[in-house]
Image (spheres, rainbow, N blue to C red):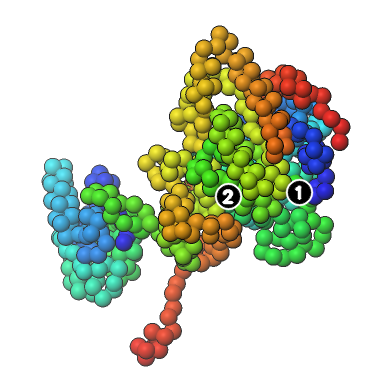
């Protein structure tokens, strides 16, 4: 065990694992985080707390993580490379560990151009792969400069993202391999809205034996509207929605219900897929649907580990 | 080369509002090539300024001059006699030329007439693109001759990030993804496997982050007998 988090224990047990996501608010109102924690409690092993997602200033992921701990939910702290240099990141990692947070997810971060402070300066002192390496060094007792820690190292279970829907397609597998090489223990993929492409990507992953080196959780996002699906497909870089799903939503009488149907079918499909360790359900601004999805797919109740 | 773009005329008129006589000083280097501050642009801007001010009935006397290179003290020496008689200098050189000018003429106001944009290349008529950020420790040997520092929107070293699609960067469909370019070029050269290696964290101390940089070459100093 690297950190002994619930997430790590579940993944190690071989049970199909479930993680969720909570987007902190654009205010200091921690009750919003608490409300979502209470709503999702017991359905997931751990909950990602986004780090100023889409470059919009929000309650910090570590701050939100503390609230989750109070609610007896396990946080997965996201850290993006956009806003902090290696000094600030390492300091935050120590802070998070001191508060009892054990899972950290390393990301590049969306460019600030899309956020609410597009005139700001970005940092990118390190990139997401280098960040994984720094965290791996830290848990082994070394700072990024090679200096040995005088005290107990932070216990961290390291995560990363993988995007099978970005390009160049085959290199996306190499990039996951680099993340595994850097020390990542698990990966959560971009939301799968094109299963055919995801299947092909997983074939390449398995061909390289990567699924044996890093736990892969497939991203699930229930779609709420046809418009949103089309928009994501067309305008969001690194996202793809298959025509099949768009057509199904288009024809459906109850679009939201069909979105949930698709998500549940995907989970059933993924349960059987070799190399998939679980799912990461991202239903930002639709958190209340998560329990239903988990119940329908038999992911609730969660096994004890 | 250094790419610059002339500041808007209104902004320049604002800068010069309290002067009666100015020197519009061009440079024969990069800004001539990128059509921002060479002899021709000096001429055009000078007449625009004079015209605008005479309309306001506050005439401005404009002296025009273009030196070979404004970032060279030597060339600035030759215009000392002109500088003496003007209220201020409007420099159309890049930020380096403007500063050299200010340093050469410590008692004279020097205004910037251009926005210095980046170190780049001329792609098409009227189109320039960034290529280098002078990071101080070049990594082009590892990236197929395509710079991730200047050309990746996030300056990452192990790209492409998850926002790369169809060869374009997540920031705009008009921006090539540097890492897609790197990947494609190394594939063409049969060296794409080199990208499997993790590029280590960069030592930014060679870049601006280490404080203002200075280069001293002792071999040349010795040679010149200093
Ligand atoms: S690596 Fe550094 S020196 Fe080389 S082209 Fe890029 S910014 Fe310029
Ligand atoms: S899309 Fe490409 S160029 Fe843009 S930030 Fe990502 S890796 Fe860099």
Residue behind label 1 places its C-beta within 8 angstroms of ligand 2: no
Q: Position of residue A54 (x, y in %)?
A: 55, 36
Q: Which residue is at the front of the view, A40 or B16? A: A40
Q: Does residue A291 show up?
A: no
Pointer 2 indicates a residue of which chain? Answer: A
Q: How far across and down, in percent of the image, does residue A222 sit?
A: 62, 23
Q: Answer few, some or many: residues within 10 Å of disc 1's Cα (few below 14, many 20 plus, some between 14 and 19).
A: many
Residue at the outermost top position: A253
Determine whether the residue tagged by mark 2 lies in a helix, strand or loop.
Answer: helix
Q: Residue at x 73, y 18 (%)?
A: A296
Look at mark 1 in the image and give the residue it sits on.
Answer: A156
Judging by the rendered image, the residue that carries numbered circle 2 is A174
Which quadrant of the view contains residue A62? top right
Give whichever of A98, A75 is nearer the camera: A75
Image: A173 above or below B89: above
Say left or right for B123 vs B49. right
């Amino acid at each position: 065990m690297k950190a002994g988090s619930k997430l790590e224990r579940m993944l190690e047990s071989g049970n199909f694992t479930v993680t969720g996501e909570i987007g902190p608010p654009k205010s200091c109102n921690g009750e919003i985080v608490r409300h979502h924690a209470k709503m999702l409690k017991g359905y997931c092993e751990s909950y990602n707390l986004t780090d100023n997602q889409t470059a919009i200033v929000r309650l910090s992921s570590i701050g939100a993580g503390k609230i989750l701990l109070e609610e007896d939910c396990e946080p997965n702290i996201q850290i993006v490379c956009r806003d902090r240099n290696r000094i600030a990141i390492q300091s935050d990692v120590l802070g998070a560990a001191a508060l009892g947070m054990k899972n950290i997810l390393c990301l590049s971060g969306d460019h600030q151009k899309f956020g609410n402070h597009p005139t700001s300066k970005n940092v990118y002192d390190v990139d997401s792969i280098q960040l994984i390496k720094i965290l791996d060094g830290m848990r082994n007792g070394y700072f990024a400069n090679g200096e040995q820690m005088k005290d107990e190292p932070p216990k961290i279970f390291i995560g990363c993202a993988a995007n099978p829907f970005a390009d160049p397609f085959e290199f996306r597998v190499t990039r996951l391999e680099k993340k595994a090489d850097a020390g990542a223990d698990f990966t959560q993929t971009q939301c799968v809205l094109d299963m055919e492409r995801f299947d092909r990507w997983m074939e390449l992953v398995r061909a390289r034996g990567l699924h044996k080196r890093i736990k892969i959780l497939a991203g699930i996002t229930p779609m709420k509207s046809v418009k949103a699906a089309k928009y994501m497909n067309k305008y969001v870089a690194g996202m793809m929605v298959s025509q099949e799903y768009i057509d199904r939503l288009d024809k459906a009488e109850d679009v939201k219900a069909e979105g949930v149907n698709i998500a549940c079918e995907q989970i059933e499909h993924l349960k059987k897929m070799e190399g998939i360790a679980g799912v990461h359900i991202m239903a930002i601004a639709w958190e209340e649907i998560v329990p239903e999805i988990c119940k329908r797919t038999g992911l609730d109740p969660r096994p004890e580990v | 080369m250094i790419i610059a773009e002339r500041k808007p005329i209104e902004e320049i008129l604002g800068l010069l509002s309290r002067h009666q006589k100015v020197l519009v000083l061009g440079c024969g280097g990069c800004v001539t090539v990128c059509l921002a501050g060479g002899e021709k642009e000096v001429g055009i801007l000078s007449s625009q300024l004079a015209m605008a001010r005479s309309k306001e009935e506050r005439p401005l006397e404009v002296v025009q001059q273009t030196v070979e290179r404004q970032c060279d003290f030597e060339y600035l020496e030759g215009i000392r006699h002109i500088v003496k008689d003007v209220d201020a200098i409007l420099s159309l050189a890049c930020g380096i030329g403007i500063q050299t000018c200010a340093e050469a003429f410590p008692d004279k106001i020097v205004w910037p007439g251009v926005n210095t944009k980046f170190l780049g290349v001329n792609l098409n008529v009227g189109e320039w693109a960034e290529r280098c950020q002078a990071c101080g420790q070049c990594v082009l040997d590892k990236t197929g001759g395509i710079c991730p520092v200047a050309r990746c929107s996030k300056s990452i070293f192990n790209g492409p990030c998850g926002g790369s699609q169809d060869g374009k960067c997540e920031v705009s469909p008009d921006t090539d993804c540097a890492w897609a370019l790197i990947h494609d070029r190394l594939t063409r050269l049969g060296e794409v496997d080199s990208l499997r290696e993790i590029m280590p964290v960069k030592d930014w101390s060679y870049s601006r982050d280490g404080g203002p940089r200075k280069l001293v070459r002792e071999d040349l100093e010795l040679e010149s007998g200093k």
